[in-house]
Amino acid sequence: MAAHLSYGRVNLNVLREAVRRELREFLDKCAGSKAIVWDEYLTGPFGLIAQYSLLKEHEVEKMFTLKGSRLPAADVKNIIFFVRPRLELMDIIAENVLSEDRRGPARDFHILFVPRRSLLCEQRLKDLGVLGSFIHREEYSLDLIPFDGDLLSMESESAFKECYLESDQTSLYHAAKGLMTLQALYGTIPQIFGKGECARQVANMMIRMKREFTGSQNSIFPVFDNLLLLDRNVDLLSPLATQLTYEGLIDEIYGIQNSYVKLPPEKFAPKKQGDGGKDLPTEAKKLQLNSAEELYAEIRDKNFNAVGSVLSKKAKVISAAFEERHNAKTVGEIKQFVSQLPHMQAARGSLANHTSIAELIKDVTTSEDFFDKLTVEQEFMSGIDTDKVNSYIEDCIAQKHPLIKVLRLVCLQSVCNSGLKQKVLDYYKREILQTYGYEHILTLHNLEKAGLLKPQMGGRNNYPTIRKTLRLWMDDVNEQNPTDISYVYSGYAPLSVRLAQLLSRPGWRSIEEVLRILPGPHFEERQPLPTGLQKKRQPGENRVTLIFFLGGVTFAEIAALRFLSQLEDGGTEYVIATTKLINGASWIESLMEKPF
């Protein structure tokens, strides 16, 4: 059991178990010994729902990564391909199957599409002459994967690009399917709110799917009170700014993939006396980051400036606990100390790891360049000099800093100015193309199409109105003991989370004017509940809102929502779902065209 998934108001282990059951049923259909051939992208998400031990119980003996030419030799009866429905993968599978057929004894082939079967892919397999080789061709609807007690993600890396650049609604359909699965397990969600074009489409798909399943009434008592669907393009600003929470900075600097992070190993090597630093490990240190680890759960959502004091307090508590052994005189006291030892040693290991990570991050955050970049970001977000060419950005281009860093800053300036004046935009584009190469003209086109880097239309900048009405910029931020969500960016309150906060009270009617300025429609739908399932809220009981970010969400926004969930008089607890966990760099990268 993944115990940390059941810590919150909503027990997400129920979802994990349902997904695991479906996987076991499929594996049992393929009787006999098995080898699984993995589409590499799926191994991370799958690791969160099924470890190797579960596969082993169902006679999985070998695992390979999907790549061209022949499969490695394996003495098994079944070969199962676990793949996303992508045409380029079908070509590799056909190559594998044809080379196996020449090899000798007949094998049974099966294919499992995640999360949906695709007619195009099956047609491609047919054209390549291997479709008939597969005994089972099925789909495994792994839409929403539980990452933590309050966090679900589809891990669909191209969802934003598909929705906003290619007008491809596949990922929206998967989101709607995922929400229907949740409703089947946790009851119908009585109220749906939404903002944005994609949110409207997902809500429409859900309503249509519900109509198509009219036969069966959902008789589960609803766990969620509201669903809030939010388009990423309603708030393009939050992912572009540098996140300043502990978890956000780990992601910004090292990148967290499927709740794991890889860190430089030298910080984690045990220091031996007189070793002179030789034999340092070269393999990256891989750590899992989730709320199952007590210390991480406590510090992950704090502003990085507040982490140091927590770690030093913890260090004192732990060393005091170890000192207790000198006071243990009687057998009973010694026995009690020994029984606490494993927990204390785990706490000490956890503290050592996070002290090392904090030192690594501090090396970055105390650098001059980090400070300069942050200063420019904060000037833009508070509305200073957003309408002219910025000298720091010019310097970054001249010194050929990483292109993603430059694009992030230029897009941030554009968003904080509702688009750039044509001559400023042309200047930036020209400088970028001349420095980094003309192949990036496609990337600039994508950023413009996504609304991130565009000319100002109608000569009006709406950002100051939005900033003032929604209180997006707070000058006096208490980073140690925050009183407002703006602590996650040391001054800027993420717009997406402010919308969720205002929806819960006093309601969106109070900000109609701003909602009209922001892109896409805003709406409210009710889903009628059968009598007897209506919820009577106890006094002091919080509402539970599921907030779904279509197009990605950052760890800083998640931290801000957790902050709201923990407020004494907040009245609402949030469970967060998204198409993908993103940061500014991974998001911009997903919109870049790879030069041929």
Image (tube, helix red, strand yellow):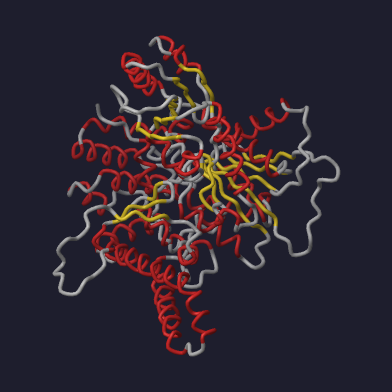
* Residue drawn at point x = 30 percent, y = 42 percent: 424
Please tell me which residue is depicted at 51% across the width and 36% down the height of the picture.
58
Using the image, determine if residue 85 lies above or below residue 157: above
Q: Is residue 151 above or below residue 318?
A: above
Q: Is residue 322 above or below residue 169?
A: below
Q: Quadrant of residue 569?
A: bottom right
Q: How many marks?
A: 0
Give coordinates of residue 469: x percent, y percent.
Answer: 56, 55
Q: Position of residue 375 (x, y in %)?
A: 33, 61
The one nearer the camera, 177 or 23, is 23
Q: Decide which of 559, 53 is in the foreground and name it.
A: 53
Left/right of residue 376 with respect to residue 233 in the rendered view = left
Which residue does the image show at 26% across and 57% down from the upper left? 264
Q: Residue furthest right?
A: 531
Find residue 418 and report its image quarter: top left
Q: Quadrant of the C terminus?
A: top left
From what the image shows, is residue 168 above or below residue 58?
above
Q: Position of residue 511 (x, y in %)?
A: 63, 51
- Residue 364 screen position, x and y as percent: 28, 61
Q: Residue at x 26, y 67 (%)?
A: 270
